[in-house]
Image (cartoon, grey):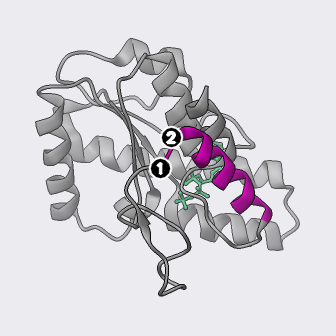
Amino acid sequence: FVYSLGGSILAGRDAQSLKEYAQALKELAKEHQIYVVVGGGRIAREYIEKARALGASEMFCDTIGIGATKLNSALLVAALGASAPQEIPDTYAQAARLAQPGKIVVMGGVAVGQTTDAVAALLAEYVHADKIIVATSVDGVYTADPEKDPTAKRLTRMTHQALARLAMETEMKAGSRSPVDPLAAKIIER
Ligand code: UTP
């Protein structure tokens, strides 16, 4: 299984809570090979915002974002203790090499111009994963942003074509968030 874990899931958790989250992943790792791709969350957003205000290029901001995903990854590795290799892979091949029964491979971003959703989708493809699970701060895909629109309805099923369409349409609207980024949606579709 490949988990795309939004940075917002880890951010703000204290050590005890991180330990509990890690414990839940360890339980899953007893039955499945687990890979976790961790997002940048608040740290990424804050740093990118400041760098942008200072005139940094978008590509340089992506590099900062990747740094934040690796920082969050390192914290999850610390929480997992002996259940995770003490190494954050820079490539998909390195991630695959680190996989061992009972060990949870944790990684962050790898290349500019995308998000960790795309990393998770590509890693899932690379390791022939059975499942990709996208864990975020909302409990599912809605017809609109449930925090802003009270009429938003949760969708229980969705085809990969509809996901790709939604990701592309959402990308066009400033400030709105898609369940996964367009590249991830296209990888999942193929
Ligand atoms: P995230 O995957 O957390 O992006 O990576 P996001 O979707 O904007 O954030 P969430 O899901 O709401 O928490 C943070 C940033 O790091 C860079 C991008 O700039 C991204 O916005 N990044 C990440 C890359 O450039 N390449 C990667 O492979 C991963």
In the rendered view, would you say 108 is above or below 88? Answer: below
From the top left corner, tell me how far across and down residue 21 is, in percent: 20, 53
Q: Quadrant of the N terminus?
A: top left
- Asked if ligand 1 lies within 8 A of label 1, the reply is no
Left or right relative to 53: residue 39? left
Identify the residue at image location x=44%, y=73%: 153
Q: Please name the predominant secondary structure of the magenta segment in the image.
A: helix
Q: Quadrant of residue 2?
A: top left
How many residues crowd around disc 2 within 10 Å: few (fewer than 14), some, or many (20 or more)? many
Give the extent of the magenta segment: 158-172
- Mark 1 is on which residue type? Leu
Q: Viewer-proximal residue, 134 or 7?
A: 134
Counting labels gives 2
Report x, y in % for residue 90.
55, 27
110 inside magenta stretch: no
For the point 21% across and 25% down, which residue is it?
32
In the figure, is residue 130 to the left or right of 142? Answer: left
Q: Amino acid at mark 2?
A: Gly
- Is the residue marked 2 within 8 Å of ligand 1, measured from its CB? yes
Q: Based on the displayed image, in which of its 4 quarters is residue 97 positioned?
A: top left
At 35% across and 60% down in the image, what residue appears?
Answer: 10
State the image coordinates of residue 56 (x, y, percent, origin top left): 84, 60
Contact (Cβ within 8 Å) of mark 2 with mark 1: yes
Residue 108, numbered circle: 2
Q: How far is disc 2 from disc 1 in space, using C-alphas?
A: 8 Å
Q: Which residue is mark 1?
A: 71
Q: Earlier in the sequence, mark 2 or mark 1?
A: 1
